[in-house]
Image: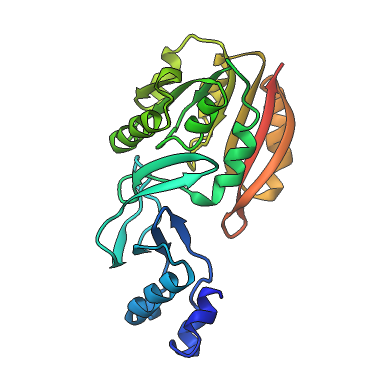
Amino acid sequence: MTLKECLAGTLPDGVLSCIPDHFDVIGDVAIVSLPPEAAAYAGDIAAAVQAVRHNIATVLNKTSRLEGDHRVCDYEVITGDRTETLHREYGCTYRLDVREVFFNPRLASERRRVTGQVRESEEVLIPFAGIGPFVIPAAAAGGRVTAIEKNPAACHWLCENVAANNLAGQVTIIEDDAFQALPMLTAAFDRVIVPTPYGMDLILDEVIPLVRRGGIIHFYTFRATNEIDILEARFRNMGMTVRKVTRCGNVAPGIARWAFDMRRR
């Protein structure tokens, strides 16, 4: 049963039509985005979420977009008494507090696609590492990972998650702004995974010199479809061979998240 089917007959039709049928689930926390006209029915909606997904302990309403350097949203609690949770994804575990850090559960299959390419003993660089959704599986695949993250809360959870997944010997964590930290590195990395935040595409200029010839870059960016060919040409001019372009979901009208898999020539 979908969320709207569960709410049919409980909410007025005009309100029901405005309710998104999709909601995000991180561990046992569900996140909905309610329009203002649904505010009076928040309790009913939370109960429906818990009816659809029986493991949910907390239901949050997202009240802002990603904001600030730490890329976190504001939430109001509809039901439940905590925002810390344990999330499982393809055999890895992640503890986090959704009020403190950014985590997108919708990218699970994309993360698996990319980290499944990591080979034993590869030197892997991951700026904007967050709580470790690329870091943990890359290290579990045998990569030696250098992770950069500026949000102190995310670094805390990243350390916790590295230890919990028994990967402490394979991950080096740098708590710093990626734009400041990358110029200080000298290693030639075999692979770089760059889950770039919106508007920070210039990080690629700092990343490319750190990749060995023949090394791989997985670069994420937010663009309109008509910009992709232009970007491919630009990346070729920067010494890259574009091997694959993957659309990873829409984020706004006309704007999607794209993954460029590239090899440095």
Give the residue displayed 45% in from the left and 57% down from the top. Answer: 25
The quadrant of the image that shows the N terminus is: bottom right
Front residue of 92 and 191: 92
Give the residue displayed 59% in from the left and 32% down from the top. Answer: 115
Q: In the current view of this chain or complex, which residue is farthest to the left?
A: 81
Q: How is the image coloured?
A: rainbow
Position above or below: 261 against 94: above
**Seen in the image, is 40 located left or right of residue 16?**
left
Front residue of 56 and 228: 56
Position above or below: 191 against 104: above
**Seen in the image, is 161 located left or right of residue 3?**
left
The quadrant of the image that shows the C terminus is: top right
Is residue 181 in sight in this rendering? yes
Q: Position of residue 20 (x, y in %)?
A: 51, 71
Q: Position of residue 155 (x, y in %)?
A: 33, 32
Position above or below: 30 against 129: below
Q: Position of residue 37 (x, y in %)?
A: 39, 80
Front residue of 63 and 22: 22
**Seen in the image, is 73 located left or right of residue 243?**
left
Is residue 62 in sight in this rendering? no
The quadrant holding residue 54 is: bottom left
Give the residue displayed 33% in from the left and 77% down from the top. Answer: 43
Tag count in the figure?
0
Q: Position of residue 76 (x, y in %)?
A: 29, 64
Front residue of 132 and 254: 132
